[in-house]
Amino acid sequence: MSSQILIVEDDEAIREMMAFSLTQADFQVIKADSGFMALQQLQQQRPDLVVIDWGLPDFSGLELLSIIRRDEVLRELPLIMLTARAEERDKIKGLEYGADDYLIKPVSVQELIARIKAHLRRARGFQKNQSLSYHSIRLDVNAHRVWVDDQLLTMSLTEFKLLKLLLENSEKLLSRERILNHVWGYDARIEDRTVDVHILRLRKALKPFNKERWIKTVRGIGYQLFRD
């Protein structure tokens, strides 16, 4: 299966040119024109690599780098900063904030593709086998896969992160506030009700396996993963 690349670039012409070239090189491409849209995309899926522009319309590419590096599921993603900022101090800053590579516009498509392939090879070579399990539920952090009763289950990245947190703290009571901080910590606009909605979606995903009842609601406090 071809690798999936997220392009975060507010200039439509550059974004579309990059998307076309990467698609021609047999990559799957996701596009975002702002930092907030990129975060929305990252809540739904885990790409294999992200290309980030520095000057985004809502917040800077540096902030986006920092947010991704603080995320327990996304922090190992290869990140390439692609920007017109050519000064050495800017390059150092980009690398310090978490970029794996720093390319200056304009850059040839061939070089960009070569850098992407190099970082993907390196990432696969250093992947750790991180797995979590609770009875018949098993989660592979690196591959973003979940198995229930040995059957592969597809879910969004948000539900995946929520399940990961529950598995890491199985049989422990987690407050809504703690869940918010771990799964949506970057966005203060998220409300407690959002946790309830995604718990409902996670239960729906587990329902065909009769495992939705393992996620207990503790009224007024939060949730707990516990098998009766």
Image (cartoon, rainbow, N blue to C red):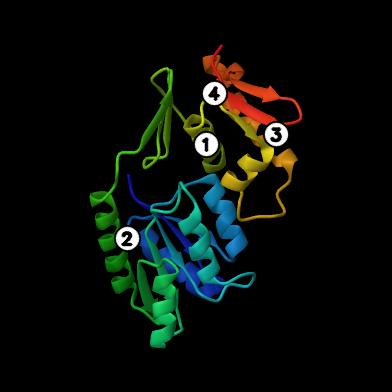
- SS category of the residue bearing label 3: helix
Q: Which residue is mark 1?
A: 165
Q: Is residue 202 left or right of residue 120?
A: right
Q: Hey, what amino acid is under mark 4?
A: Glu
Residue 27, how many percent across, how many down? 36, 55
Mark closest to the chain's N terminus, 4 or 1: 1
Q: Which residue is mark 3?
A: 196
In 3D space, how far apart are the residues under numbered discs 1 and 2 (Cα atoms)? 36 Å
Of badges 4 and 1, the one in the foreground is 4
- SS category of the residue bearing label 4: loop
In 3D space, how far apart are the residues under numbered discs 4 and 3 (Cα atoms)? 18 Å
Tell me the crowding category of disc 1: few under 14, some 14 to 19, or many 20 or more residues within 10 angstroms, Cα based.
some
Q: Does the residue at mark 1 contact the one at mark 2 (Cβ under 8 Å)?
A: no
Q: Hey, what amino acid is under mark 3?
A: Asp
Q: Which residue is mark 4?
A: 171
- SS category of the residue bearing label 2: loop
- SS category of the residue bearing label 1: helix
Give the residue at x 39% y 79%. 92
Tell me the crowding category of disc 2: few under 14, some 14 to 19, or many 20 or more residues within 10 angstroms, Cα based.
few
Vertical position of residue 171 compared to residue 197: above or below: above
In 3D space, how far apart are the residues under numbered discs 2 and 3 (Cα atoms)? 41 Å
